[in-house]
Amino acid sequence: MNSTPEPFVFIVDDDEGIRTSLSRALDTRGYNTLAFASAQAFLEHYEPGTSGCLILDFGMPEMSGLELQQVLVKRGRSIPIIFITGHGGVPEAVEAMKYGAVDFLEKPFRQDALIKRIDAALKLDEQTRRVDDKSRTTKARFERLTDREKEIAEFLVSNPSNSSSKDVARHLGISPRTVDHHRARILEKMSVHSVAELVDQSITAKLFSR
């Protein structure tokens, strides 16, 4: 039995008619929807760990859709956003996409066009969460390394073409045999089989990002 919660399709639009029609149409198609009349109402209820996507009206009073997007970005991981607008233009779309919006639809739009965007956004959210989970696991494993192992791991990742035990030993002023011992422990603790895998994991998790 799959215990993973179903993702939500959040709808934020100050137009009650649009909120109602979208919610009904999507509920009929089997999506889990939650609708809000304002950006502030959404922020008060949304928990960042919730999977899903956001259908967001661009031009709302008080806090616009773009302002809500920027708030979410500043708070960390951002939910995939599909903007909808009745008076959008190229500058608005460019601004929204710059901050990571999945798409930008002008009202009125075809329902099947929105469905296609929703499915793409939910798939993106799932992939992002999978990468995030893998990154958290990598970081947790890295924290189990000793200070010396971390030092060697960083050198191996930063210098993949000069990663022989002699290269590492020369850089750190220790013996190649000692490096061999540490290397074996690093690969074991990080659950990888090669330096190449260690490099891939480290890049994905941004372990040594500058």
Image: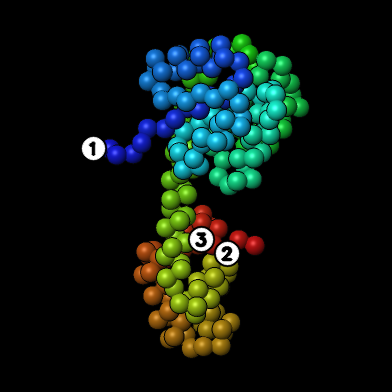
Q: Nearer the viewer, residue 62 or 5?
A: 62
In the rendered image, residue 48, in percent from the top left (x then y), is placed at 50, 42
Mark before the other along the chain sequence, 1 or 2? 1
Q: Residue at x 64, y 45 (%)?
A: 74
Residue 197 placement: quadrant: bottom left
Left or right side of 155 for 62: right
Is residue 108 visible in this depiction of the protein? yes
Identity of the amino acid at label 3? Ser
Q: Which residue is mark 2?
A: 208
- Whole-angstrom CA distance, mark 3 to mark 1, is 33 Å
- Whole-angstrom CA distance, mark 1 to mark 2, is 38 Å
Q: Quadrant of the N terminus?
A: top left
In this rendering, the answer to whether 190 lies above or below 57 is below
In this rendering, the answer to whether 209 lies above or below 148 is above
Q: Secondary structure at mark 2?
A: loop
Q: Quadrant of the C terminus?
A: bottom right
Q: Residue at x 64, y 34 (%)?
A: 68
Question: Label 3 crowding class (10 Å Cα cut-off): few <14, some 14-19, many 20+?
Answer: many
